[in-house]
Amino acid sequence: ELQKSCEYASVDSATITNTFFPNSDNKNIANVKFTATVKVKIEGKLAQDLQKFRTASALFSEYEKEMVELDRSYKEQIDAVDAVRKAAQDKYLAQEDERGYLIGDRQKHSAEVRELYSQKEALGKEWLSASNGVFDKYTGRAANLLYATNSGKVQTYAQPSKPEIPLACFGYRDPRKPLGILYRAVMDGKGSSDDYYAGVETSIEGERQMIKTDNGWRVAGNL
């Protein structure tokens, strides 16, 4: 039952510890208690995918660090231009006569604002060019590791996704199942599902209801 659910699991030393009939008048239904040693080790393509993920994550972290610094510098420059614009706006609005009419040089103020917007536009183009420059810098190393995306004129790399261990290999949604017991034991003991890749072993105990059929005893639900 366990090995059918997860190709990475193996069972050693399975032993029936007790068998009893919940209904003494019906000898075709029995409850069987057992103990077993369970081993789980992720191998093959899934293990290779995890190693690829770790390499990709390290590369993405390097790329992301450069992008964060670039974005920080760009934001500082934009904030500085916005501060100048706000100061100019406040100064212009503060120039009033006794009746509350604005008396500042409107044309001069409009020209200043247009210049500041032009500066922001130029900074945006510089950021775009620099962002794509960082993207291009990693093109060779990112091949087959990072997924490239395109948002408008900006090319970026997406954070890699960790390969998923098949849920059947955990079975944590049902703690009554052997792998649910194993999962809980691993998480309680080591705290990381990555232990499955290194290999884990634990003793479990459980109980199954068996039904006698024409083809012999079968686990209830798996007839």
Image (cartoon, grey):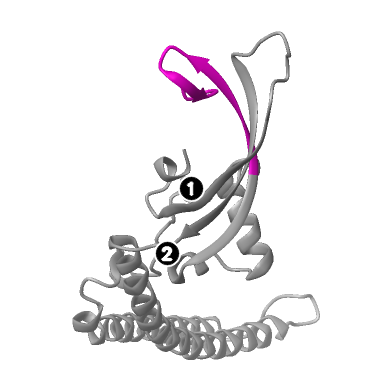
Residue 139 point in image, percent of width and height: 21, 80
Q: In this view, does 41 lie to the left or right of 91?
A: left
Q: Is residue 32 left or right of residue 220?
A: right
Q: What residue would you read off at disc 2?
A: 162
Is 20 drawn above or below residue 117 in the view shown?
A: above
Residue 79 point in image, percent of width and height: 56, 86
Is 35 drawn above or below residue 145 in the view shown?
A: above
- Give the magenta-colored segment's residue range: 206-223
Whether residue 218 is visible here, answered yes or no, is yes
Out of 16 and 150, give the one closest to the viewer: 16
| Nearest to N terminus: mark 1 or mark 2 | 2
Magenta stretch contains residue 101: no
Q: In this view, does 151 lie to the left or right of 111?
A: left
Out of 181 and 217, give the one closest to the viewer: 217
- Alpha-carbon span between mark 1 and mark 2: 14 Å
Task: Give the secondary structure at mark 2.
Answer: loop
Residue 54 point in image, percent of width and height: 39, 76
Task: Give the secondary structure at mark 1.
Answer: helix
Graded by Cα atoms within 10 Å as few (under 14), some (14 to 19) or many (20 or more), the crowding at tag 1 reads few
Which kind of residue does numbered mark 1 sit on? Answer: Leu
Q: Predominant secondary structure in magenta?
A: strand
